[in-house]
Amino acid sequence: MRIAMTGQALRVMLQSADDVTPDVLTSLLRRHDPDVAVTGVTVGHTWQGTTSHLHFDVTYADPNTRLPQRLFVKTQLSTVHELPEAFDESLSEGGGGTVLYDDETRFYRDLRPDLDVETMTTYFAEHLDGPSQFLIIGEDITLRGAQVPDAVAGLSVEQVDALLATLSRVHAPFWGSPRLADGGDLSWLQHPVTGGFAAFLRDNGFAIIRALIEAPYKKALLDAAGTDMDAMEAAFWRLQERVARDPITLLHGDPHPRNTYALPNGQMGVLDWQLVRRGSWSHDVGYALIGALSPELRRAHERELLDNYRGRLLDAGVTSVPDREAMWTAFRQSPAWGFCMWAIAPDQMYSVEVVNAVLSRFAEAYLDLGTGKLLS
């Protein structure tokens, strides 16, 4: 593994977890703590999806260091393995989908330190000049007792309420902020209509969705939503136009069950900020609530959960909160995003069981909330 500064990016060739040696980790962590010295690194659990997730047990020269003895590293090991060919092209070695990794890296480097929200503490985040593209080093949240919920079973109503409380702490400080407007210092965040990820979806993403929706179980869920792919894609883009309207705020972008975690005290955290963006609150809230709850629990509690979220914004001093009915309408429009984002999820990334469970929640919500009619 080579590390050299080349402008704003590190030049890194990372081929395997074994390339993360004590010397390499020392040089990276000294961005956070100039005096740190790593003396030992042991590779633990690893996982390869659209990114590489690596866990390391670490020893330090100073046993009293405040850095944790287990670290989590998110990067890209050469290329995306065992995914459909279109994903290899789009998500590895500089493909169009890599805009997501740039944004997540920038979030952890530039925005995370100023956020009072339950998410991973990071010690290094930088763009890379090379095939690995990015490198993020953070805490291993399991050391704090964090548990990722079972996406198939879904979350409890109490967990979803806590998750929306966490999202309100993301949203409230940036609600209607001029920093998010074009020309503001946060205008680099993805825009629902004109951003790089939107361009990726137009150029390639929906072609992938249309290919993957042909899987029999996904096609059955599209039918269950009461629509076809042409109408779903049209609804998706109408939704993006609406979530781009003021007031906009900072969004996590992708708070589905596998990107959340529960702490022993009942608090819910969020991980994987690859889709961090600017836009309407309804993007996060609709996606989080619908993706996490069984249809029966959602129908019984969705209005109550929206009211609780709205109340937290008011308690935080947000003055331009939409009224209850406007929030309800925006929520009812939101399933178009969730359905498309889970239709594009390859079975190799999670499993058929997980994708089917979450996608079915969005399909049922799309039908019984009247999403297609609202976005026609």
Image (cartoon, rainbow, N blue to C red):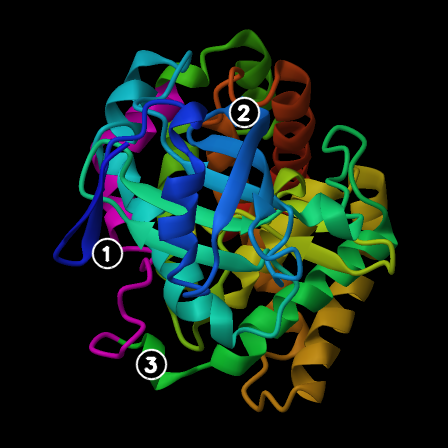
Q: CA distance from mark 3 to mark 2?
A: 36 Å
Cα gap from disc 2 to disc 1, whole angstroms: 32 Å
Q: Is residue 197 magenta?
A: yes
Q: Range of the magenta residues?
A: 182-210
Q: Which residue is mark 2?
A: 47
Q: Relative to 73, does residue 223 appear above or below in the rendering?
A: above
The residue labelled by disc 3 is 179
Label located before the other in sequence (3 or 1): 3
Placement of 302 over or under 225, stated as above or below: below
For the residue labelled by badge 1, is the local secondary structure a helix, a strand or a loop? loop
Q: Earlier in the sequence, mark 2 or mark 1?
A: 2
Mark 3–mark 1 Cα distance, whole angstroms, equals 17 Å
Q: Amino acid at mark 3?
A: Arg
- Label 3 or label 2, whichever comes before in sequence order: 2
x then y, percent, for residue 7: 12, 57
Describe residue 316's horizontal placement relative to residue 56 as left or right: right
Q: Please tell me how crowded label 2 is: few (under 14), some (14-19), or many (20+) other residues with Cα within 10 Å.
A: few
Q: Answer yes or no: do the residues labelled 3 and 2 have beta carbons within 8 Å? A: no
Q: How many marks?
A: 3
| Amino acid beneath label 2 | Trp
Q: Are marks 2 and 1 in contact (CB under 8 Å)?
A: no
Left or right relative to 131: residue 240:
right
Q: Position of residue 249 (x, y in %)?
A: 46, 72
Residue 282: quarter of image: bottom right
What is the three-letter code of the residue carrying label 1?
Answer: Thr
